[in-house]
Amino acid sequence: MPKLVFHAPPGWPEPPKGWFPPAGWQPDPSWPAPPPGWVLVTSTGHRVPRWVIKVGSFAVVAVVGLAIAFSQGESESDQAPKVGECARQVGSNAVARVDCSDAQAAYRVTSRHDGTTDIDAACSLDEQATAGFSEDVSVRGAVSVKSFVLCMADLP
């Protein structure tokens, strides 16, 4: 609990150590007025150690960063084709959702498996799957925030 400390202004008698004016106390009228801005009472409140502030600040930044990364991972995951939707291949290692009537549609998603990037294991029980795609969304290539496999069947 913070402790209040009384500071006698210049020209006032020095009070005993630890003395604090009781409720209703008034200074002697013969004493000079305190100088402008003089603080009669201060608090010796408990200070938070610097290391606690540094660690706390780091923790807040880390949590906010991970939350942003996770939401970005969720956003990318939400953009992936869903089961029953069609996809086209983009480049050598990506797929994009397209309407199944689109001439570029090459696959129909038959199943989705979150928390893995192992296409063989994820699609081994999907009898319709003829192809697979995996995505691993990470923060600066280090912390994986979302991974999933899409198992797909070739469109006729």
Image (spheres, helix red, strand yellow):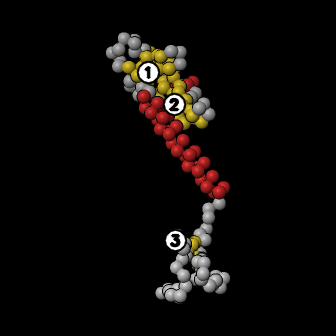
Q: Relative to 64, is 109 on the left or the right?
A: left
Q: Residues within 10 Å of mark 1 (few under 14, many from 20)?
A: few
As drawn, the label of residue 79 is none
Q: Position of residue 111 (x, y in %)?
A: 45, 27
Callout 1 amino acid: Ala
Q: Residues within 10 Å of mark 3 (few under 14, many from 20)?
A: few
As drawn, the label of residue 148 is 2
In what quadrant of the picture does the N terminus appear? bottom right
Pick whichever, 76 or 105, lies toward us: 76
Q: Is tag 1's residue or tag 2's residue first in the polypeptide sequence?
A: 1
What SS does tag 1 mark?
strand
The label nearer to you, 3 versus 1, is 3
Q: Relative to 40, is 86 on the left or the right?
A: left
For residue 79, say whether it is visible.
Answer: yes
Callout 3 amino acid: Pro
Q: Is residue 135 above or below residue 64?
A: above
Residue indicated by mark 1? 96
Contact, CB < 8 Å: mark 3 with mark 1? Answer: no
For residue 125, say whether it is visible.
Answer: no
Residue indicated by mark 3? 36
Label 3, label 1: how far apart the Cα atoms are: 72 Å
**Residue displayed at 58% across by 77% down:** 9
What is the total number of numbered labels drawn onto the structure image?
3
